[in-house]
Structure formats: C-alpha cells, structure tokens
C-alpha cells in the first residue's frame, strides 16, 4: 500500500494482477506479438537479472560501476553536498552506496512500484549510512511523483542508473524524462546511465550469453504467464533470441516459436507459426549526440558526461 492508501499492485478476486493480464492479452493479440519488459521482474526474474550482471559477457553493470568509482571526486565537485538523492528504482547494493559516498547528500529517496523490494533496499541503505534520512516512496515514476514533505525544500539529484531508460522507445523515454523533471522541480540535476553503441558481436553476446542465463531470464516470462495468468504456453517450444535493430540502434530480445504452437492465457486462445516471435525487450544504445538529444527533448540540459575506460557505457549529468 503506497502513500494515501493507494494500492499500486492490485490483485483481483482471483489473485491476478489485472495490469499484467491486460498487457499480456493485448500484446499477444498484436501482429508482432510483444510484452513490455517490465513484467520480467518477478522474484525469479529479479534474481536472474542479478545473475546476468555477474556474467562475463554482460559489461554494462561493471562499466557503470567503474565510472562511479573512478569519478567520485568530479561528481562531488559538480553536484555539491546537501542534495536529496531521488533514485528511480529501488537501488542496487553497489551503485547507490558509491554515489552517496561520493557526494554527501542530505537525504535519500528511493522510488519503486515493488514495495517489498523497495523497503528491503531502503533498510539496507539506511544501515550503511547511519545519519542519512531515508524516505522510500512506493510509486510509479512514469508519472509525476509527490515527494515526502521532509525533502520538499531540498535541492534534488535524480539518479537513474543501469541504462533502464534504454528499455523505452523514444516517445516513452521523453515522457519519463519530463515526468522526472516535474517530480524533481526547478534547479534539479539528473545523473543517468546510457549504454553506448558498439560492435554488434559484443552487444549480441551481452544479451545471449554462453551460460544461457539471459535465455532463462527471457523464458521466465512465459513461466510467469503460465503461473499467474493460468496459461498453458509450451515454454520449451520457444527459443531465446537477441537481435540488433540497426534502424533504432537497439538490441531486441525475442522468444521465437520453434514449431507451430497453440496455447491459451486467461481463457483466450492464441496460435503462432514456427518462426514467429514474441518481442519481449528493447535495449536502446546511444551515442553522445543521441543521448544529449534525448535529454534535451525531455527538458534536461546536458552538463557533463563520463564513460568507462573502454568507452562502453556513459553516465550523464543534466540540469532541469
Ligand atoms: C536492466 C534494462 C538495463 O537492457 O541491459 C539485461 C535488462 N535484459 N539482459 C538491459 C537486460 C537482458 C537490462 N536493463
């Protein structure tokens, strides 16, 4: 239960999340079947993503962490002390402490829709930084979020690491950046991670690792649909695929039907021919120019930019 008693993750009388069901049924009814990537993250999916970040092929987490470690002094200088750090997403055990140690913030406000994850992450953070006020807020940050009154008058720093913005198409990413600006207010800064365009083979193997962890992450979505939405999708009939889409400069993940399949979800029937796919994720990759253009389109003025030593990943600082 979120602020003002608002229930954010609703369940109907059968214990089904209606937003999940609506997205899945609508997505499976399209010509190119597609399900939004945010539904990957049930408990199993969140654990599988943690495993992905440890893979030798998956460089983004290590590259971004390298920047946060190496540039602490520059962050401190440009951002200054006393800001309330508002993190979009409940925070990782590694990146958030690196940022907080670098800049001497006055408060930490993690925002997330998943209340349990949020409270656990907030408690862990509070234990690491005794004396730092921590105010978790359960909210959907795709809309403007009302921040707790304790931080109302403090200058804000938004933190959105991980290149999660890359999951969104340009239109949605722009909307999110604009909402962030409304949430954070005038004079706010935003520190945001964006993954960079690089050799196609490097990108493909980051999303199709040799150990098959990303394949399990992708297929877990089908297990989740079967379990939570009463589906009978034959999961073994789907293969994980990572594709480079050069028009939009993004990695796409698909689940490709290996044979003709028929299945039902929540009582609705679907069929697919062999070779047809369900599109499950976009992960956009940026250049300096496209990242700056996206920020500007979202109402943010680019102020500084850092990359890791191999120029695989970028962290950008922007001002509202
Ligand atoms: C968490 C969205 C940043 O796109 O790289 C990792 C998710 N998907 N491997 C990404 C993901 C497949 C990840 N983000």
Image: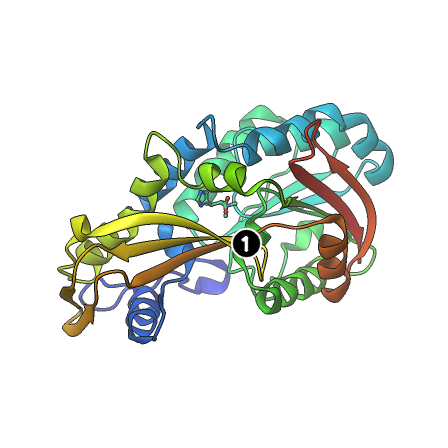
Residue 18 shown left or right of residue 73 in the figure: left
Q: Nearer the viewer, residue 258 or 114?
A: 258
Give the quadrant of the C terminus. Answer: bottom right
Image x and y of residue 293, in percent: 75, 60
Q: Is residue 41 visible?
A: no
Image x and y of residue 184, in percent: 71, 57
User: What residue did someone put label 1 on?
Assistant: 250
Give the quadrant of the N terminus. Answer: bottom left
Q: Nearer the viewer, residue 7 or 71?
A: 71
Q: How many marks?
A: 1
Asked where in the image residue 101 lies, by quadrant, the reply is top right
Residue 155 shown left or right of residue 45 in the figure: right
Residue at point 83%, 31% (across, down) = 74
Element assignment for label 1: strand
Alpha-carbon neighbours of circle 1 within 10 Å: few (<14), some, or many (≥20)? many
Asked where in the image residue 70 lies, by quadrant, the reply is top right
Image x and y of residue 316, in percent: 74, 45
Q: Is residue 90 visible?
A: yes
Residue 143 shown left or right of residue 317 in the figure: left
Residue at point 70%, 41% (across, down) = 315
Residue at point 34%, 35% (across, down) = 213
- Taking 103 as reference, is 232 above or below it? below
């Amino acid at each position: 239960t979120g602020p003002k008693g608002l229930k954010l993750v609703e369940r109907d009388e059968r214990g089904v999340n209606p937003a999940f069901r609506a997205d899945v049924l609508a997505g499976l009814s399209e010509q190119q079947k597609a399900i939004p990537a945010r539904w990957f993250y049930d408990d199993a999916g969140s654990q599988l993503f943690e495993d992905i970040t440890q893979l030798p092929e998956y460089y983004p987490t290590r590259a971004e962490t390298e920047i946060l470690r190496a540039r602490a002094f520059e962050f401190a200088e440009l951002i200054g002390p006393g800001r309330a750090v508002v993190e979009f997403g409940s925070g990782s055990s590694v990146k958030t402490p690196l940022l907080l140690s670098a800049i001497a913030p006055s408060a930490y406000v993690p925002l997330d829709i998943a209340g349990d994850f949020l409270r656990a992450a907030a408690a862990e953070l509070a234990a690491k930084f005794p004396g730092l006020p921590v105010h978790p807020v359960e909210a959907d940050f795709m809309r403007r979020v009302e921040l707790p009154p304790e931080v109302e008058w403090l200058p804000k720093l938004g933190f959105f690491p991980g290149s999660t913005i890359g999951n969104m198409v340009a239109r949605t990413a722009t909307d999110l950046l604009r909402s962030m600006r409304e949430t954070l207010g005038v004079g706010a800064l935003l520190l945001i991670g964006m993954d960079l365009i690089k050799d196609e083979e490097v990108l493909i193997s980051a999303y199709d690792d040799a150990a098959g962890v990303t394949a399990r992450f992708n297929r877990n979505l089908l297990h989740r649909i079967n379990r939570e939405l009463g589906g009978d999708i034959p999961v073994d009939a789907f293969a994980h695929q990572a594709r480079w889409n050069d028009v939009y400069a993004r990695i796409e993940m698909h689940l490709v039907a290996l044979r003709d399949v028929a299945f039902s979800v929540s009582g609705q029937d679907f069929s697919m021919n062999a070779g047809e796919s369900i599109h499950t994720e976009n992960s956009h990759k940026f250049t300096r120019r496209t990242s700056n253009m996206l920020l500007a389109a979202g109402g943010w003025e680019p102020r500084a930019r850092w990359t890791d030593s191999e120029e695989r990943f970028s962290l950008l600082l922007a001002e509202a």
